[in-house]
Amino acid sequence: MSSHGNLSAANDPRQPSAAKPYVPPAVAPQDLPVDYSGFIAVIFGLFGVMFRYKLSSWLAIIFCAQSIANMRNYENDLKQVSMAMMFAIMGLVSNYFGYARPGRKS
């Protein structure tokens, strides 16, 4: 049985000396895929501020967190995420601490 183990090791086509570590290819910032979660966060943040939807502002916060977790291009994505976060926070502040909407009793 030990001779079979040596035989399979001798016929192994892999060569450890030829192995190279994986280096990901360099991608230009303009060629990176679009950050959809950051874009959706901006849209939800705008809806939360303009139409005073609480759910929309909370969804904007969630999509901001997802965008931060998947950030690839830090300069552009950070601008977009910070803008979306500002809209979401402004929407939450205006919804919870602002004046009540006309026609609604709180």
Image (cartoon, rainbow, N blue to C red):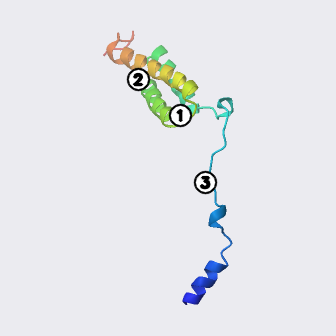
The mark lying in front, picked from 1 and 3, is 3
- Kindly identify which residue carries mark 1: 71
Label 3 and label 2: CA atoms lie apart by 49 Å
**Looking at numbered disc 3 in the image, what kind of residue is underneath it?**
Pro
In the image, 63 versus 44, the foreground residue is: 63
Q: Quadrant of the N terminus?
A: bottom right
Q: Name the image quarter holding residue 8.
A: bottom right
In the image, taking residue 65 as reference, residue 22 lies left or right, namely right
Mark found first going from the N terminus, 1 or 3: 3
Task: For residue 43, say whether it is visible.
Answer: no
CB atoms of marks 1 and 2 within 8 Å: no
Counting residues from the N terminus, which is met first, the one under dot 1 or under dot 2?
A: 2
Mark-to-mark CA distance, 1 and 3: 24 Å
Residue bearing the label numbered 2: 54
Task: Write down the quadrant of residue 103 in the picture.
Answer: top left
Image coordinates of residue 102 in percent, x first then y, are 39, 9
User: Which residue is label 3 attached to?
Assistant: 21
Residue 79 drawn above or below residue 21? above
The residue closer to the viewer here, 13 or 67, is 13
Q: In x, y percent, where is residue 23?
A: 62, 48
What amino acid type should be assigned to the residue bearing mark 2? Lys
